[in-house]
Amino acid sequence: MRLPLLAFGSVLTLGLSLPGSARAVSATGLSSFEAIEEPLVKLYPAIGKFESDSFINITEVGSGTFRMSERYNAEWWDGDRDTTNTDRQRAEVKGLGAHQKHGETFLYTTTWRSNPEFRGSGGFCHLFQLKSTNGDSGAPLVTLSIHGNRATVEANRVGPKIIAREFPWKPATWQTVRIRIKTAPTTDGELMVSVDGDAFQGRSGIELSRPDANEYRPKWGLYRRAATGMTMGNDYVEHKAVSAEKIGVPAIENASLESAARERGVGSSPEKALGWLQSQPASAGRDYALGTLAALWAETDTAAAMTWSEAQESPGVRHDAVERVFSRWENRDITAAMKWLHTRAPNRELDELLWLLATDTTYRYVNRPIALDAAALIVQPELRAAAFDHVVLIWARHSADEAARFLAGTSALTADQKASILRKFRPAEHPPTGARRPSPASDSP
């Protein structure tokens, strides 16, 4: 079980002012993010054994700074959440503000540094990812990655892979990277990068999308390949001044409200901090801060935070708070979280939450029963069918017969929906097919 990341009594370590907060959604604490992907197991590679681990890899270290630690030695290393993946380590946060749609331009910012001994691994090593929430989400669309003493911003798109910019980096040295992205399935996308305040450089007039995808969300942290005999150690990456800005729309000025509400929670209670926020003038920043404080509360009392979230009259506040509280609950105890879902769903208001759960790579690649369970609870027929499509096609890559038998037996899909999914199986899996299926990337899911 993952221990609470931050209690209200410790919020004074957080900074009250973050660069860019006037024009972007800014992360004032871990609860600002939509979800946290904390390593929950250690892998002993020699015997193929996984062991639950309570060490907290993702922490707040003051002044709006987040540390993502990953331990590695010859005997064992931190794994990928609680999955049985043996070839990677992951400590990431994901989602900050609205998800990005095709045709929209977003600016994603971080100031980051590593520990002094950090070296790029022999495989993939990502500090930032922009991943689709639908379509082919196996590989990220955009990454900020380390290769030896060089860093790159790359695009793994429908077309040929591109490197938008390459630049040097040094261990234990703060570096600010701003990535401007316009996602597009046609040739009007762009991927531009500014390093330490210099002019944006990169590529424009390009197709920038994942196959069959049209929505994306950012991730920050440390995600790297792991294998026996690699020259890695106990490393960390720190991110600060993290923000996500949607260009061309009014700002969500959440930072000052979140920080002030956190201060009011010290020595008081979450309810009072949230009550103070609700007394402030209505704004998008206030509403976002309410979700942040509810998520913070969930780290110490998930049930109380969920009860408060469900009681909110504003649909937007209720949806955001429920989703962020649920993500903390899911990380800590997926069995209990799914039991709660079954007492509330089917419910159209929960469809987006269920979609994200069913299509999350943690579940559709590694823990398929959870993904299938979530998909079946979706109310909207087309969205439900699309969720099953995502999960079953991954399944069919490895066991087409089992996937086909599942489709034949499920009552959650119509005959036409089943036939549509079956037609997308690869020729080697099940005829017929006319659908293009990209090869999975080496660093997916």
Image (tube, helix red, strand yellow):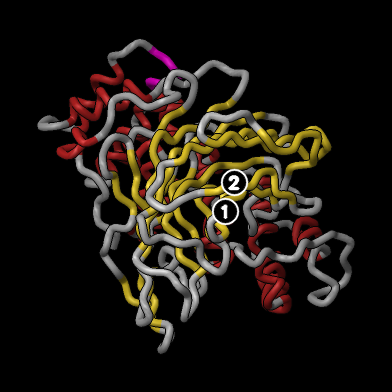
Q: Residue 6 versus residue 240: which sits nearer the camera?
A: 240
Residue at 73% x, 57% y: name it.
Answer: 414
Question: In the image, what residue type sits under mark 1?
Answer: Arg
Distance between mark 1 and mark 2 Cα atoms: 6 Å
Residue that lies at the very extreme toward the bottom in this rendered image: 47
Query: In terms of image quadrants, where is residue 235?
Result: bottom left
Q: Report the magenta residues as a range.
A: 282-286
Q: Is residue 283 magenta?
A: yes
Q: Residue 345: where, in percent of width, then height?
A: 48, 47
The local secondary structure at tag 1 comes to strand
Q: Residue 234: where, in percent of width, then height?
A: 34, 65
Q: Earlier in the sequence, mark 1 or mark 2?
A: 1
Q: Residue 95: where, in percent of width, then height?
A: 49, 41
The secondary structure that most of the magenta stretch takes on is helix
- Count of labels in the image: 2
Relative height, residue 199 to residue 232 (above, below): above
Q: Residue 219 versus residue 146: which sits nearer the camera?
A: 146
Q: Is residue 342 visible?
A: no
Q: Quadrant of the N terminus?
A: bottom left
Residue that lies at the very extreme toward the top in this rendered image: 281
Residue on which disc 1 sits:
150
Q: Residue 349: where, in percent of width, then height?
A: 51, 37
Asked whether the residues under the numbered discs 1 and 2 touch, taking CB atoms below 8 Å apart as contact, a structural biologist would say: yes
Residue at 47% x, 80% y: name it.
Answer: 228
Q: Is residue 278 magenta?
A: no
Residue at 61% x, 63% y: name it.
Answer: 444
Residue on which disc 2 sits:
167
Question: In the image, what residue type sits under mark 2?
Answer: Phe
